[in-house]
Amino acid sequence: MSKYDIAFIGHMCRDEIVDAQGKTSIAIGSAVLCGAMAAVKCGKKVAAIVKMDPKDAPCISILRENGIDVHVIPAKETSYMRVEHPSTNLDERRMTLIHNAGRILPDELPAFSADRIHLAGISDQEFSLDLIQHIRKVFPSCTLLSADMQSFVRRMDPATHRISFSMPEQPETIIRSLDCVKLDNVEALILTGEQDLTKAACIVAGWGCRELIVTSAERAVCVANGNLYSGGYCNKNSSGRTGRGDTLFGAYLSARLNQEPESAFHFALALVSIKMETPGPFKSTLDQVHSRMSEISITRVCG
């Protein structure tokens, strides 16, 4: 049985991006892609367990070419997300899940062993509370189970396939079942009613999750071991904004394997700042990340 530092689970996806001028581009996407690429570039042994149509093997070539072990859960179709930006604000977007690979069932998971398992979904069509509980039972080597809350807050209308953001069922139960969660300011607002990142992070932490990261366009906050840290980015442009949170979290999970939360958060902010300057997943070097860390300031807000 293969042993990994981190395993990422979710859909592989094609993203159709329509900008404010109506220009369309299509690229391989998904939270799995950006998170796993950040982790492998950090020198970690990484697995990607993806649900997709096996005929779309070119979608996963970038993962395999970078040393990531890919396990495919066969589906009738590969997920396809249209993302429309009605303005130049890249955080403003309308999403439609045109094709959907379907829910990942407990008995579909392959046999593997990982120190960290991250549920990296793009909508509510991938994971269930039953899957989380199954992973808890059958993967004893996993010391940290995490999830992206967009996997529960992004909800697909079964008739139109449009994605809306709304409160999932049993949000506190989901979060209590996890060791670490990732969410952005929109998801945090839906879950807590708080626009302030710091207040929202404290509320979510109070539901029983020991570690979490909340991102926004300007900054991110990290809660761990009773402390709350805040820091901004230092990117020179935002042409690679898509995948910001997934990349940051993949870098954070990687660094946390051998670093304390504050230094891991600092490292992740520097790495994602570089990623945001170029479309696609993170492709730069660790030397560049360590050099960029001097441009990032971390503040301990409380704790």
Image (cartoon, rainbow, N blue to C red):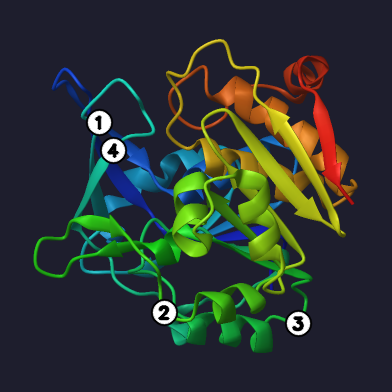
Choose the circle earlier in sequence order: 4 or 1. Answer: 1
Calculate the distance from the C-alpha at mark 2 to the C-alpha at mark 1.
Answer: 28 Å
Calculate the distance from the C-alpha at mark 3 to the C-alpha at mark 4.
Answer: 39 Å
Calculate the distance from the C-alpha at mark 4 to the C-alpha at mark 2.
Answer: 24 Å
Q: Left or right: 183 with respect to 303? A: left
Q: What is the three-letter code of the residue carrying label 2?
A: Glu
Residue at point 59% right, 16% down? 235
Q: Which residue is mark 1?
A: 85
Q: Which residue is mark 4?
A: 93
Residue 26 occupies quadrant: top left
Residue 247 occupies quadrant: top right
Contact, CB < 8 Å: mark 3 with mark 2? no
Choose the circle earlier in sequence order: 1 or 3. Answer: 1
Q: Look at the numbered disc 2 and give the secondary structure of its residue.
A: loop
Within-10-Å neighbours for mark 2: few <14, some 14–19, many 20+: few
Q: Left or right: 48 with respect to 45? A: left
Choose the circle earlier in sequence order: 4 or 2. Answer: 4
